[in-house]
Image (tube, grey):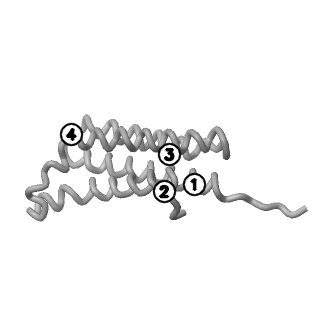
Amino acid sequence: FISWNLDFLGFSASFLCAIHCLSLPFLLSLGILGGASWLEAPAIEWGLIVVAIIVASWAIGKNYFETHRQVHPLLWAILGFILLLSSRFIEGEFEHLATAIGGFAIAFAHYENWKLSTCRVVTSQ
């Protein structure tokens, strides 16, 4: 799985985004990243969401049409997109939770897409 392709890039970015969303409020409250409040700037968060949607749409959509025709990676990605986008309109701790779950859903979609597009079942004749 560790190869330089869109699924690896998308998985890594989505997974790190989810970890970031879960840990950043805790680290900011402890003062560890007190001067790094720019990490929660709306422009940065929207930029990361847009990049995640573009990379996932391209990677999963391309492999859906060209390789596997399985719908579940698309469904996981759509769930993640919905959670990421809706988290922008939620205040409080649920915002971070929705964003993290959305990030994990997109990371899982990339993993499933990679599995379906690279793993082949060999049948003996």
Q: Mark 3 or mark 4, which is nearer to you?
A: 4
Name the front one of labels 1 and 3: 1
x, y percent for residue 53: 42, 40
Q: CA distance from mark 1 to mark 3?
A: 13 Å
Query: If you read the primary sequence from the N terminus, does the residue marked by circle 3 or circle 4 appear first?
Result: 4
**Are circles 1 and 2 on residues that touch, CB within 8 Å?**
yes
Quick check: 106 above or below 43? below
Q: Which residue is mark 3?
A: 76
Marker count (numbered): 4
Q: Residue at x 44, y 51 (%)?
A: 10
Q: Which residue is pictured at 58% across the width and 40% down the height?
A: 62
Q: Is residue 122 positioned above or below 13 on the image? A: below
Foreground mark, 4 or 2, reads 2
Q: CA distance from mark 3 to mark 4?
A: 25 Å
Residue 80 in which image quadrant: top left
Q: Amino acid at mark 4?
A: Pro
Mark 1 lies on residue: 114
Mark 3 in CB contact with mark 2 (< 8 angstroms): no
Quick one: label 3, few (<14), some, or many (20+) residues within 10 Å? many
In the drawing, what numbered circle is on residue 8? Answer: 2
Give SS at disc 3. Answer: helix
The kind of residue tagged 1 is Trp
- Disc 3/disc 2 C-alpha distance (Å): 16 Å
Asked if the residue under mark 4 is in contact with the one under mark 3, i.e. CB atoms within 8 Å, the reply is no
Three-letter amino acid code at the position of disc 2: Phe
Crowd around label 1: few <14 · some 14–19 · many ≥20 (10 Å):
many
Lower position in the chain sequence, tag 1 or tag 3: 3
Mark 4, residue position? 42
- Secondary structure of the residue carrying tag 4 is helix
Quadrant position of the C terminus in the picture: bottom right
